[in-house]
Amino acid sequence: MRIVSLLSAATEIVAALGMIDQLAGVSHECDYPPEVNSKPRVTRCPIYGAGLSSNAVDRWVSETLAAGGDLYTLDVELLRELAPDVILTQQLCEVCSISAATVTRALATLPRAPRMIELSPNCLADILQDIGRVAEALDVQDRGEALVTSLNARVDFVRDRTSQAASRPMCFLMEWIDPPYCSGHWSPELVALAGGHDPLGRPGADSTRVSWESVLQARPEVIVAACCGWSVERTQQDLPILEACPGWNSLPAVRAGRVHVVDGSAYFSRHGPRIADSLEILAEILHPDLFAGCFPDRGAVRVGA
């Protein structure tokens, strides 16, 4: 079986199912596990790795989409050479990776159409269901069931322990800093499972821009910067932007030293097996008394610590 994955989450699912050797091609963003970095790249993005500011990235995305343009390019000739049996894509977010509509148009030009699996999760249950769908398409249903069972066990562990929490802090999970974006889709659910409440989050819906005034009004007790597609190091570069916002120092999270930066690219933005890691990161941030030492270090940084 020859598999082409057009999004990083799908690539991680394939790898977790033990099918990495069957991956014929991946997207420009696929980087985990490290073995996938040797695979042919079938997508491109003109600003990928360009070093633009966060505001410039947001402006380019908005202007390109408003003009009816494409954020990503699919190498149709390479796809034809790879001759995949299965192609994994998404129709959840045209900002995060190439759209299913673009892929569908490209597949119509191939001499033999592969089976296309579209991942479009809006919540944690959808992510787990998508893992099962990929496993079924790759004819490894038993591995899929085992993987989902193990992920559910990790979710249950967090849920059971947070039931002992004395409080559920208000947590603003940021998906972008300049301009500020709230969390969407599965992320507010992760905050709730981790024992908190995201007053600005949009469960099951797209992340969207929020005014700084709404952040001040929400008075979050914890702030977690999980910028979509950004590493911890890249997100830290934007912290001065937050610190310069009016009223920043008055926020309860800032006054209590509970501002954290996490790897949005590796964890929160990816709707694959490491979604359980994202939940565990949040649980330890929100309730260190309950979860200290329970999980491996995933590189989260407490600002000012």
Image: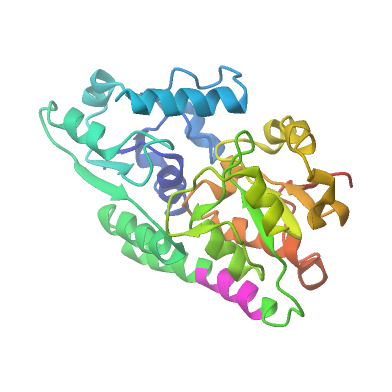
Residue 60 coordinates in the image, percent (x, y): 47, 22
Question: What residue lies at 69% left-to-right and 35% top-to-bottom?
Answer: 235
Residue 71 in view in this figure: no
Residue 75 coordinates in the image, percent (x, y): 30, 21
Labels in figure, total: 0
Residue 41 coordinates in the image, percent (x, y): 40, 25
Which range is magenta?
Answer: 152-160
Foreground residue, 119 or 20? 119
Q: Is residue 68 above or below residue 302?
A: above
Q: Is residue 71 above or below residue 16?
A: above
Question: What residue lies at 58% left-to-right and 57% top-to-bottom?
Answer: 200
SS majority, magenta: helix
Magenta-colored stretch includes residue 52? no
Q: Is residue 152 above or below residue 32?
A: below
Q: Which residue is outermost to the left? A: 111
Residue 288, picture quadrant: bottom right
Magenta-colored stretch includes residue 156? yes
